[in-house]
Amino acid sequence: MGFSTVAGFVILLMVSITVGGYLLHVVVDQVKDFGKLSKLVNERRLEIKNSNFEIVEINTSAISNTTYDLRIVVRNTGATTFDCEKFTILVDGVLVNYKVNVSKLYPLESAEFEVENLEGKAGSTHRVMIVSDNGIKRISSYTVT
């Protein structure tokens, strides 16, 4: 009987060590993943904090009695570089396609966005919202001339 007690104890000890090692491995992996995620979140917060742009100028030119073209000048007043192809432009809440003169908007530089064939008569007032790739948005109103 003495041998079976010792053998049972050794077996339970080995199983406990194996299970404990597995649990420790899982916990360490979770802590590493949490650390990586925290680093990404902090980098994203810093990027958003250092990002800023402003609408400098809005010009319109009537094409016909019911359509016009829109030109928007945007200046990067922050410390990060924007990808101009990833901007979103909404005119009166409607997503529109645009052309831009540069692909990257570097700090302290400007970009011109052009939207063509929008509906609106001379003298009508509209709102434009520009959203950057990291979620910063600016809203402005303009009148078609």
Image (cartoon, rainbow, N blue to C red):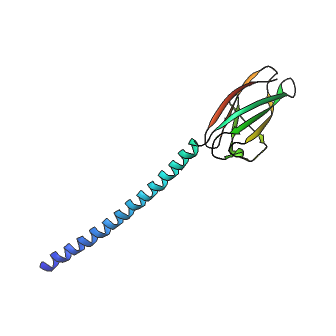
| Residue under the point 66% across and 47% down | 81
**Residue closer to the observer: 129 or 75:** 75
Quadrant including the N terminus: bottom left
Establish if 87 lies above or below 36: above
Establish if 45 lies above or below 58: below
Where residue 94 sits, quadrant-wise, is: top right
| Residue under the point 35% across and 63% down | 24
Residue at the farthest left position: 1
**Residue closer to the observer: 13 or 104:** 104
Residue at the farthest top position: 123
| Residue under the point 44% across and 54% down | 34
**Residue closer to the observer: 24 or 133:** 133
| Residue under the point 83% across and 27% down | 67
Establish if 71 lies above or below 43: above
Where is residue 113? Give x, y as percent.
Answer: 76, 38
**Residue closer to the observer: 84 or 53:** 53
Quadrant including the C terminus: top right
Where is residue 6? Give x, y as percent.
Answer: 17, 76
Where residue 134 sits, quadrant-wise, is: top right
Where is residue 14? Give x, y as percent.
Answer: 27, 72
Instruction: Determine whether, in the image, residue 45 is placed left or right of residue 119.
Output: left
Where is residue 19? Give x, y as percent.
Answer: 31, 66
